Image: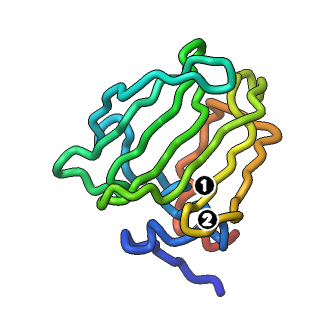
């Protein structure tokens, strides 16, 4: 088609390429650190480990997609295990779980991500990270309109 498609904010919650991930999951237009207020809401056992639950609530003037996000983080090494995404009405919309923790690109991180939408029981999308390179410089020219049109 050789045309540029700009994704408007209204499309950020749309599925990415038919998956259970959204355009916002890839773009991350908002900042979890700057646009949300955080508080620990609990400590629970999970698979024999202590897990801290952290609630992220959007700041009043933040332009964000979710009404709140609850993070489940392993206390021992701060490894993310799960994220629960809630609408502005407080309803849980989907759950992202992380597993298969191993070393990739010199960093230890979960290499399997499973997104499960609550509205579609039995549905899920899995992303498996096979390899990664971190901290490699990227030339600004890569993201120019001219270069993106060539690809």
User: How far across and how far down the image is residue 63, in percent?
Assistant: 27, 56
Task: Identify residue for label 1.
Answer: 142
Q: Which of pointers 2 and 1 lies earlier in the amino acid sequence?
A: 1
User: How far across and how far down the image is residue 131, in percent?
Assistant: 80, 37
Q: On the picture, is 46 further left or further right than 8? A: right
For residue 132, above or below residue 19: above
Residue farthest left in this picture: 60
Residue at image location 62% in from the left, 64% down from the top = 20
Residue at image location 70% in from the left, 33% down from the top = 110
Q: How many marks?
A: 2
On-image quarter of the C terminus: bottom right
Task: Identify residue for label 2.
Answer: 147
**Dot 1: within a 10 Å radius of its alpha carbon, few (fewer than 14), some, or many (20 or more) residues?**
few
Residue at image location 66% in from the left, 73% down from the top = 18
For residue 98, above or below residue 135: below
For residue 12, above or below residue 101: below
Check contact, mark 2 vs mark 1: CB within 8 A.
yes
On-image quarter of the N terminus: bottom right
Residue farthest bottom in this picture: 1
Which secondary structure, mark 1? Answer: helix
User: How far across and how far down the image is residue 146, in percent?
Assistant: 57, 69
The foreground one among 10 and 7 is 10
Q: On the picture, is 48 further left or further right than 36? A: right
């Amino acid at each position: 088609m050789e045309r540029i498609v700009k994704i408007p904010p209204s499309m950020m919650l749309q599925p990415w390429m038919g998956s259970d991930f959204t355009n916002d999951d890839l773009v991350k237009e908002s900042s979890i650190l700057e646009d949300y207020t955080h508080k620990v809401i609990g400590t629970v056992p999970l698979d024999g480990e202590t897990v801290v639950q952290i609630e992220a609530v959007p700041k009043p003037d933040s332009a964000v997609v979710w009404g709140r996000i609850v993070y489940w983080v392993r206390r021992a090494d701060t490894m993310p295990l799960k994220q629960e995404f809630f609408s502005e009405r407080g309803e849980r919309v989907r759950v992202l779980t992380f597993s298969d923790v191993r070393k990739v690109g010199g960093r230890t991180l979960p290499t399997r991500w499973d997104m499960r939408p609550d509205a579609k029981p039995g549905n899920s999308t899995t992303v498996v990270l096979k390899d990664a390179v971190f901290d490699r410089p990227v030339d600004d020219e890569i993201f120019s309109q001219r270069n993106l049109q060539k690809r």
